[in-house]
Image (tube, rainbow, N blue to C red):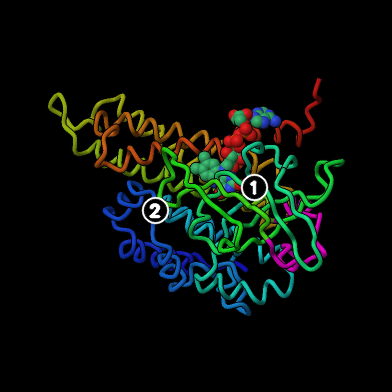
Amino acid sequence: MGISAEEFAMIQDSVDRLLDDIAPVGEVERWDREDSLPRALVERMAGVGLCGIAIPAEFGGLGLGDRETLAVIRRIARRSTALASLYIASVSYAGANILHLGSAAQKAALLPLVAEGKLLFALGLSEPNVGADLASVETRAELDGEEIVINGAKRWCTGADYSDYIYALVRSGGVENRRRNLSFVLVPTDSPGISMTKVETMGMRGPSTNDVRFDDVRVPRDNVMGGFAMWNRAWEQLAGPTLEIEKLQPVAMAIGIGEAAVEEAWAYSQERVQFGTRICGHQSVRHMLAEVQTGLQACKLMLDHSLDLIDRGEASSVQTSMTKLFVADGVVEIVLKCQRILGAYGYAQGFAMERLVRDALVLPIFGGSSAIQKGNIANLLKLPKG
Ligand SMILES: Cc1cc2nc3c(=O)[nH]c(=O)nc-3n(C[C@H](O)[C@H](O)[C@H](O)COP(=O)(O)OP(=O)(O)OC[C@H]3O[C@@H](n4cnc5c(N)ncnc54)[C@H](O)[C@@H]3O)c2cc1C
């Protein structure tokens, strides 16, 4: 369901008002410094309808769509990637996955909790030996009567420490055919047998990322995403309707980071005076600012075009991969250029720029690396392999 430009502007206004209240600059800096942020912020976002933005009204949401969700992610990331990550754990890892892949019982039980800001998922895909090659997942799940027993380890499980469930990709049968015998299981984070160790990262700090171990963790077999009928069918779910939007979430976050960097550099260039003139008067600085504005505009158009294709139900895989590649690499360039405009102040704590640089550097690494997207694009466009 679409909304009018006026309604959309109202959503953005309410996001901005909320951010002024819950994410002032001092708090954003503290979340980054301490690598933690309060989970209660999710309920504040839910309080103005943001967590239920794409959840149908029958489950307590606003019944809007992916375009609106991504617009909110972008707006929040412009202020704080930590808060945007928390939001994604609610609306996307939990909300979108349950909405698109959940059984009727899971939707009825869990979607209202998402809309109320009371349910967060952490994404459990990566493992010590598993990065891009998800079909090689080693964490094992075995059936024992009505229960599933899980053993293994997940890595980079962001927000596992404050989430309710780990949305875990597990090996639920033999490895004969790599893509078969994989399942998605909802593992409550307070289950006996789960242990976690925090991993320090240079950026994206706030929602800390974790190594998670499963030692004989038992969950009911109904905890398979989509119900037990989806046991051994995770690959269909991974490659299903959520994949396209999953590629675009880091894109929305990236554009928010890029916007914040450009705004800071644009403003700074009009304050800093060197050689008797504001530095925005020096041609090389003007050119850099023109370049970053142009790059940012191109990123926004790439995202819009991907969303247009998805909205029209047209094939979008090539475009979403191109968008992830272009925006992730592009925003790194944009942010580094903005940092140069701030000179030494872009390298020091106290300005947002230093944090934005650290946050931006992960964009081509996660959510499908730039190299993986290039492979996807060439393959999808059927370029012969030799
Ligand atoms: C801050 C942060 C948060 C994260 N949060 C989560 C999370 O919540 N849940 C989760 O499951 N994971 C998470 N990840 C992991 C992230 O999704 C992985 O980084 C990603 O899956 C890639 O795995 P890898 O980094 O181990 O790289 P690898 O897959 O080991 O790749 C290493 C290098 O080889 C290249 N490469 C690999 N395969 C190919 C190929 N076929 N063709 C060309 N090049 C290739 C890659 O591009 C990369 O340059 C997070 C990572 C970070 C840094």
Q: Position of residue 378 (x, y in %)?
A: 72, 31
What residue is shown at x 19% (from left), y 32% (from top)? 278
Q: Which residues are magenta?
A: 218-241
Q: In the displayed structure, would residue 272 be above or below residue 114? A: above
Q: Secondary structure at mark 2?
A: loop
Q: Position of residue 375 (x, y in %)?
A: 70, 31
Residue 23 falls left or right of residue 197: left
Q: Position of residue 28 (x, y in %)?
A: 33, 52
* Residue occupied by mark 2: 36
Q: Quadrant of residue 370?
A: top right
Identify which residue, 385 or 135, lies in the foreground.
135
From the Cβ of disc 1, is ligand 1 less than 8 Å away? yes
First reached walking from the N terminus: tag 2 or tag 1: 2
Q: Could you say whether the residue bearing mark 1 is in a helix, strand or loop?
A: loop
**Amino acid type of disc 2?**
Ser
Q: Which residue lies at the image location 46% right of the left edge and 68% below the top edge?
A: 6
- Which quadrant: the C terminus? top right
Label 1 sits on residue: 125
Q: Which mark is residue 334?
A: none
